Image (cartoon, rainbow, N blue to C red):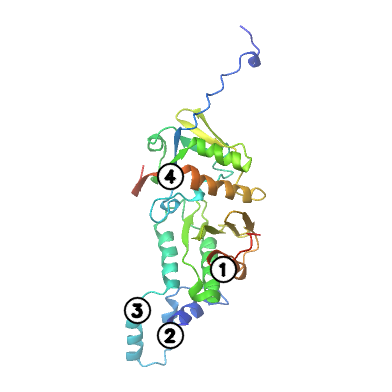
């Protein structure tokens, strides 16, 4: 894994929950000479965005432009980021780029479409809500037990033409 | 005059012809695909508080601009016959009924919550893919 990608993941997933990617820079070793830190910052600003950063940028842009009624709740945003960070950490380059849909009830749907198949992860707005995955090809089903592992399995089903039926 | 209301029931609305096109508001731009050629299934999710009777549609595409109070991302056109086809395929009584012209509803959708969540998701997905098309895109959103 590229160093900066590891840095992003390590900084984003910690025991206290999700923190901003920008925090990675703030945590950068202060023991480095200031000139080295300066070059690291410059490099960080001009390098190409990683897939993970692009996905999170898409999500945050959606949140920022949404109006009050559609603005996703903190819980929905936190869940969406957590699923993305943790599943990305398991799949790395195989993690497909998703689309985001606002459900109008302060939830977020993370949506993947490929090979005639669809996976929709519903990140619901309220504490106590049970997130779920809806998936379909010719068949369809709902998966209530959403974890990074179940999402990884479902995304592998989406992208790798696994022959077994949906359920 | 006969006072029994059942003796003189109101006339049932004429069923819409299958080739009728009706219209629904796209409340957010994420309800369209990135290239704006497809409609997302979320446009056909029925919610308990918002859609107690059914999903609101209009008989003409100007309908929303007269009644809404906040900007929308566009208008979705819906083919009535294709709505009925989806209902037939899934053995659900789906129909489009005009109650107070030009206002109407798509009737027969289950709520998008447990225990009907799975069927609601499937119906919404099929309606989005087979019966709905982007009709107008508003960028930026407007009334």
Asked whether A156 or A70 is in front, the reply is A156
Q: CA distance from mark 1 to mark 4?
A: 30 Å
Q: Earlier in the sequence, mark 3 or mark 2?
A: 2
For label 2, the residue is: A28
Q: Residue at x 36, y 47 (%)?
A: B137
- Distance from the alpha carbon under mark 4 to that under mark 2: 49 Å
Where residue A57 appears, x then y in whole percent?
41, 67
Above or below, A72 relative to B26: below
- Cα separation, mark 1 vs mark 3, equals 29 Å
For label 3, the residue is A47
Badge 3 marks a residue whose secondary structure is loop
| Badge nearest the viewer, 4 or 2 | 4
Structural distance between the alpha carbons of marks 4 and 3: 39 Å
Chain identifier of the residue bearing label 2 in the image? A
Q: Which residue is mark 1?
A: A156
Q: CA distance from mark 1 to mark 2?
A: 34 Å
Name the front one of labels 1 and 3. Answer: 1
Residue A30, by quadrant, is bottom left
Q: Residue furthest top?
A: B1
Which one is nearer the viewer's eye here, A21 or B29? B29
Image quarter where the N terminus of chain B lies is top right
Task: Categorize mark 3 by other alpha carbons within 10 Å: few (<14), some (14-19), many (20+).
Answer: few
């Amino acid at each position: 894994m590229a160093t900066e990608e590891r840095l992003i993941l390590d900084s984003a997933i910690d025991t206290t929950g999700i923190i901003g990617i920008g925090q990675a820079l703030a945590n950068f070793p202060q023991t480095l000479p200031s000139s080295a830190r300066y070059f690291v910052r410059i490099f960080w600003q001009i390098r190409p965005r990683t897939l993970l950063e692009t996905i999170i940028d898409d999500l945050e842009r959606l949140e920022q432009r949404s109006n009050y009624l559609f603005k996703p709740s903190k819980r929905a945003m936190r869940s969406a980021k957590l699923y993305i960070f943790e599943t990305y950490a398991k799949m790395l380059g195989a993690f497909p780029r998703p689309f985001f849909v606002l459900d109008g009830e302060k939830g977020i749907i993370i949506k993947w479409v490929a090979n005639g198949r669809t996976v929709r992860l519903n990140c619901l707005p309220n504490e106590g809500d049970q997130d779920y995955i809806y998936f379909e090809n010719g068949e369809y089903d709902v998966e209530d037990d959403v974890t990074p592992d179940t999402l990884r399995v479902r995304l592998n089903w989406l992208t790798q033409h696994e022959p077994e039926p949906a359920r | 005059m006969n006072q029994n209301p059942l003796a003189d029931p109101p006339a049932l609305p004429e069923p819409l012809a299958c080739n009728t096109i009706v219209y629904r508001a796209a409340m957010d731009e994420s309800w369209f695909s990135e290239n704006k050629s497809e409609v997302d299934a979320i446009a056909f999710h029925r919610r308990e508080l918002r859609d107690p009777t059914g999903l609101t549609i209009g008989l003409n595409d100007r309908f929303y601009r007269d009644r809404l109070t906040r900007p929308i991302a566009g208008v979705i056109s819906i083919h009535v016959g294709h709505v009925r086809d989806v209902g037939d395929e899934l053995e659900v009584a789906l129909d489009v009924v005009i109650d107070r012209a030009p206002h109407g509803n798509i009737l027969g959708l289950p709520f998008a919550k447990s225990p009907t969540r799975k069927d609601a998701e499937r119906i919404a997905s099929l309606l989005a893919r087979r019966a709905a098309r982007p009709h107008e895109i508003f960028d930026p959103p407007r009334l």
